[in-house]
Amino acid sequence: MEIHDVERDSETDDDQRSLRELEMAGYTREDARDLFQQYPRHTLTIPRKPVQKPISSHFRENLSPTSPTAPARTSFPDIEIVSQDSITQRTTGEENTSRYFPDFDFETVTPETVRDHTPVQDSSRELSIVQEEPVHTDRPLSYISGVEEIQYVAPKSRLKAPDHEDNPYQSVGSQDNLLKLHVPNRKDTRNWIWRRSADWWLMEFLSCLLSLLASAAIVIILKVYDDQPLPKLPHSITLNSILALFAALAKAGLMIPSSEALSQLKWVWFTEEERPLVDFETFDQASRGPFGGIKLLGMLKFGHLASIGAIISILSIATSPITQQIISYHERFVPATSGPLAQAPRSDLFMAYNPLSGSTGVPDLSMQQAVKMGLFNAANESIAASTPSCATGNCTWPEFSSLGICSKVANVTSFLHVATVPGNLSASIGYLTENNVTLPNGAYLQAGEMAMNITTLPDTVGGVAVSAVNYSLAFSNEPNAEYTTISNHFIIWQNNEGQSQGDFGALEVLMYWCVNTYSTQIRAGVSTTNITASSVNIGSNNASITLPVGNNMNGTYQKYGELAMNPMNSTTNYIVDGPANAALTSYMALTFRGTYSVGVAGGYSSDAAMVLESALYGGPSQANVTGKTADDMQLSGVQNLTQNIATSMTNNIRSRQFVGDPAIGISYINQAYVKVSWAWLSFLLILLASSFAFLLATIVKSRAAKVDVICSSALATACALSQEMRDYMGPIELRGRTWENANGLRVRLDRGAMGWSLEGRVLVR
């Protein structure tokens, strides 16, 4: 409403309008005229609308220090007065539960009016105040007509608005003597949000949300990188650093509500009954960290809701190290995407031999060398299979097949026939009696002349390369043996090298073509090859012939020709060339024959005899060490020797060029990868859930105790003690002295007319 300083001799149009406005404001026409006539020097303008909107209260006026009549506080709540040389500042504070509605503004304001709280001559009538229930609105509050300011034109000699730049209420236009009565907006947006966030636990719930989001980020990051290669992040940032960052955010987010809830329970603790004032500090320390939490637990003995907060505070110490346990780094092999191929040699064809005039020919030098290498290898050591090619040192291959040589050894001592004959006394070493030892197929040992004899079926009969069909004793039932055999020899020996009336032994050795299936891998540069299956299945049969055999050897023989082998479930044919097969068989027959004799005229007649003598007669001496029988050791020695020969020959067959495509494997490289242990994450999630539950329980308990939301407010702490208690505590001293004083007080939080305060009594000491 505006009041203008004018002279009035008679009722003007403005006068009539003012009367009507007074009537609209609730005055009778007669009262309006009386009111109008009471102020002959002014025109009174009344707002058209009645009072509807609340106006905030509690403002302070600071008049000019030069004014001797400057009051400490205005007598008109809800109206901010700016007078000469002064600026009224807004006072911040809690609003009253009631709002005030002035139904009329006033005409003239003087320092006397403000000081005495009463109107003076030439001023308006008293301000009428009506107390009502608050009307809530989000809009800035203003005075009754809806505008932001009330302007009043007063005599220039009495009041004047300041004219400097910092004056927010500076007059406008040509009315330099304008006095503005301003209704300030007490609901400043930022302050309002801050106050409401404190009253509604907004910051605590936002902290819980922050912790939840940080925990969700941890879960997402772990899910993305779990079982994945070690990431290469920019600026050398590690996954542990990222995890530590979000773990710190999650910890901070869950500790804020827990700490504030502990601080709130500090006030609730004193509403229940009188407590030592020193408990106030114990709660306060618990809200700051784990050491205070331990102290609080010692005081509460787990008998109060605050114990949960103390436990959360203590356990929070382990958040960082336990979170780091979530991820660990391991190494694994992964297929290499570049580099040389992993190759394992294999063969599906053998045709190498050197033809000789008038003979079946001989194997090439590399095969002869392979036979000798296997023969002269130590009997107690094994020859390894061909080493594949692997650039990375770690490779695997799917099972693959290759043409090769297999061997078997059997004890046929039970087939021996021993005949006693008169001894030959003319011999260099003779006995009265001697033994002739034979096998049913004609293999023999002539006692008195031999301690060991190696017998192999002749490789040719009538100039034709052949293999025995019914010459074998132990392997006569082997499938396709008549087509695949390349050497079938018998070893008969006397266990007593002195040729006394000792016992005898016999072994049968069979070497034959086969197709082996291999399982191969290389780990850390060490190759391991195992034979998982062997096949002697043939795809074509060769015609057989029956020929007479002299030298007490009778049997059926198979003429050598091309051999085609076809393992089950395989579409590959493995071919052995006929001439190459005959040449190898003839060479094996010449190699595995010979005798070993004792005495002055004794010795070895072949390399095979020398090697087999060592394997046979070295077996009994090793029997005492291994715990096996002499027979077992002899059999084992010959088996290992024969297997070495077969492996060496197979390696030679597999390593030849242009006899089959190599088996392609997979090369592996070492890769560091992230392994997530999800169980460790449960600690952080349980702590977060506990903090949120603790906050909710604190809110419920506070409302039940009807305690306002105070939490860790330092201002509330400063104002909490009553005047009597403050007098007792005295000025701030050393912590020990202050603690002693506090320990002598028993206080309780009560709500009086002026708000919450700690009231209590002093203990008699």
Image (cartoon, rainbow, N blue to C red):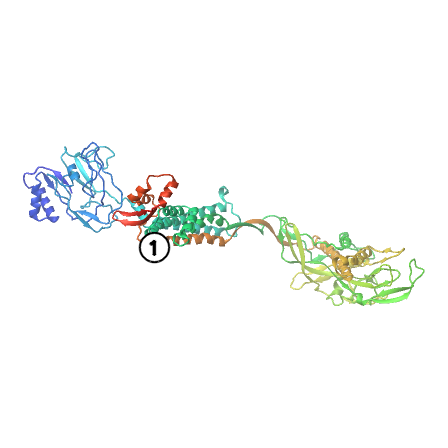
- Residue at 69 percent across and 60 percent down: it is 515
- The percent position of residue 380, horizontal first and vertical second, equals 75, 55
Quarter of the figure with the N terminus: top left
Residue 618 lies in what quarter of the image? bottom right
Between residue 218 and residue 35, name the one nearer to us. Answer: 35
Between residue 568 and residue 265, name the one nearer to us. Answer: 265
Q: Amino acid at mark 1?
A: Val
> Dot 1 corresponds to which residue?
700
Task: Please say if 205 is above or below 424.
Answer: above
- Horizontal side of residue 586 vs 23, given as left or right: right
Q: Secondary structure at mark 1?
A: helix
Residue 599 lies in what quarter of the image? bottom right
- Residue at 51 percent across and 45 percent down: it is 232
Between residue 569 and residue 34, name the one nearer to us. Answer: 34
- For the view shown, which residue lies furthest in the right direction? 426
- Horizontal side of residue 215 vs 455, given as left or right: left
Q: Say few, some or many: other residues with alpha carbon within 10 Å of mark 1 (under 14 / 14 to 19 / 20 or more).
A: few
